[in-house]
Image: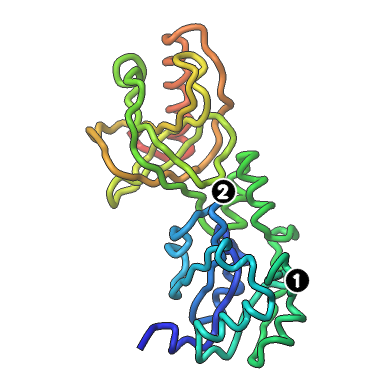
Amino acid sequence: MQLTNSIKSIAIGSFDGIHLGHRALISKVEAVVVIERNSGYITPGYKRALYIEQPCFFYHFEHISSLSAKAFVEKLKVDFPRLETIVVGYDFGFGYKKEGDTARLKELFSGDVVVVSEVTEQKIPVHSRTIKGYIAASNLALVRAFLGRSFVVNGRVIAGQGLGKKELVPTINLDIYDYDLPKDGVYATRTKVGDVWLASISFIGIRETTDGAFAIETHILNQDIGEIKGTIWLEFVEFIRNNKKFENLESLKEEIFLDMILAKKILNFKD
């Protein structure tokens, strides 16, 4: 028997970020249908499933965008033959050019349609677009509050310019895509290498003082972890300062050490 044959309740949405509003839907069902658009996300692709206990089923937008509202509901009935309950948000739209809304869904689906009202945090409506604005502004405290968890990204380790280890501090250089990222600057962070979260300081932006290239790099505080390959996770804890250009490498190095002192205080890191 296929897993979908036993599922009686689903929540539907893009679920970008799995924030507090999304959890209000997800908590009511046995499975989650994620509408995947393949664009910038708080939490992209399959990684959303890491924050959802229930089984997740992905519908790629380009494969369903031409379906009418009725055809979309028929697809759900075929994919989930025992479906009894659909849970959606108050602003849910579906079908070709979003011709369907929650009222239309209730007309087309013979089972129960549960519409979850807007969720607020600190009297502010919780929406992905709002959280993206907080990420862009590096308001990480509000990002955490709205997500109900830390803001983390995942990236592939790549070769850097090699200057950090020789002249400054050794860093892990990252290729991070699909995520919405905080503004350029320096951050107190935690970096997950293997199964261990390590205190770190990270940089996003144009390397103004050296090669003028965009970079995302992280330095593990007071620990030599050797060569790292594969992918790692980066948790943004607090913004430290904006990116800026220094007169020379020595001035940059002095600033980096000051940044490290502040990062250690933020992270409550003991030397």
Q: Residue at x 56, y 45 (%)?
A: 180
Instruction: Residue 172 in the image: state x and y as whole percent.
Output: 34, 32
Image quarter (top left, top right, bottom left or bottom right) of the C terminus: top left
Could you say which quadrant of the image residue 11 lies in?
A: bottom right
Question: Which of pointers 1 and 2 indicates the residue nearer the eye?
Answer: 1
Q: Is residue 266 left or right of residue 218?
A: right
Residue 99: assigned label: 1
- Callout 1 crowding tier (Cα within 10 Å): few <14, some 14–19, many ≥20: few
Q: Residue at x 57, y 91 (%)?
A: 84
> Is label 2 in a helix, a strand or a loop?
loop
Location of residue 266 with respect to 152 vertically, above or below: above
Q: So how many labels did they put on this image?
A: 2
Location of residue 38 with respect to 98 vertically, above or below: above
Q: Residue at x 52, y 12 (%)?
A: 246
Find the distance from the CA under tag 1 to the CA under tag 2.
24 Å
Q: Is residue 168 left or right of residue 236?
A: left
- Which residue is labeled 2 in the image? 40
Q: Residue at x 60, y 47 (%)?
A: 141
Q: Amino acid at mark 1?
A: Glu
Instruction: Residue 266 in the image: state x and y as whole percent.
Output: 48, 38
Q: Residue furthest top?
A: 247
Location of residue 145 with respect to 217 vertically, above or below: below
Q: Residue furthest front?
A: 66
Q: How is the image coloured?
A: rainbow
Task: Pick whichever, 230 or 199, lies toward us.
Answer: 230
Image quarter (top left, top right, bottom left or bottom right) of the N terminus: bottom left
Could you say which quadrant of the image residue 90 lies in?
A: bottom right
Task: Pick whichever, 13 or 98, lies toward us.
Answer: 98
Q: Amino acid at mark 2?
A: Gly
Task: Pick whichever, 120 or 12, lies toward us.
Answer: 12
> Is label 1 in a helix, a strand or a loop?
loop
